Amino acid sequence: MKILFVCNQGKHRSRTSAELWKQKHSNDKVHHIGIFVEENPKKWFDWADRIYVMEDYQYNKLLEIDDSMRTFGKITILDIEDIYNYYNSKLIKVLIEKLSL
């Protein structure tokens, strides 16, 4: 399975999520992006079997880029605020819970 994690800059939440996912699902291909810094985010949307966005805001931005994503049913909104640094212990706890890791 190909898993994509999306946050604003791709530095903290999505990066931490991707690393945690890889630890538990070593056979999956995992990538993370910052939706506001990635030059061609659509290529990653097309690549992914499953997309996890941190907030409604990224989901809405994703739909601005490619409205057809609405019908694919492969997007999950995790509802994780942009208040955590990379690999923060509280962020890890939230991710383990929300991703059932």
Image (tube, grey):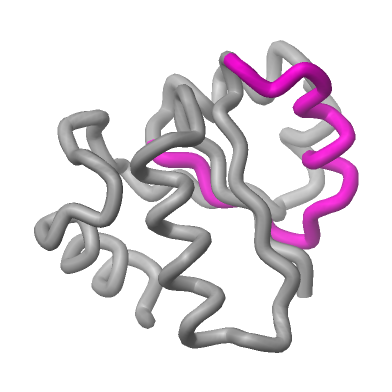
Q: Looking at the rendering, which quadrant does residue 87 occupy?
A: bottom left
Q: Position of residue 73 (x, y in %)?
A: 71, 52
Instruction: Read off the magenta span.
Output: 37-54
Q: Position of residue 99 (x, y in %)?
A: 39, 70
Q: Looking at the rendering, which quadrant does residue 22 occupy?
A: bottom right
Residue positioned 61% across, 17% down in the render: 37
Examine the rendered structure and indicate whether residue 71 appears above or below residue 35: below
In the drawing, does residue 57 fall left or right of residue 75?
A: left
Examine the rendered structure and indicate whether residue 71 appears above or below residue 89: above
Whether residue 74 is in magenta: the answer is no
Whether residue 52 is in magenta: the answer is yes
In the drawing, does residue 36 fall left or right of residue 3?
A: left
Q: Position of residue 13 (x, y in %)?
A: 36, 44
Query: Which sits in the foreground, 94 or 38?
Result: 38
Query: Which sits in the foreground, 30 or 81?
Result: 30
Examine the rendered structure and indicate whether residue 22 appears above or below residue 72: below
Residue positioned 19% across, 39% down in the render: 84
How many marks on residues?
Answer: 0
In the drawing, does residue 86 fall left or right of residue 43?
A: left
Q: Which quadrant would the C terminus be assigned to in this image? A: bottom left
Q: Looking at the rendering, which quadrant does residue 77 occupy?
A: top left
Residue positioned 67% across, 63% down in the render: 30
Q: Position of residue 83 (x, y in %)?
A: 16, 32
Q: Which quadrant would the N terminus be assigned to in this image? A: bottom right
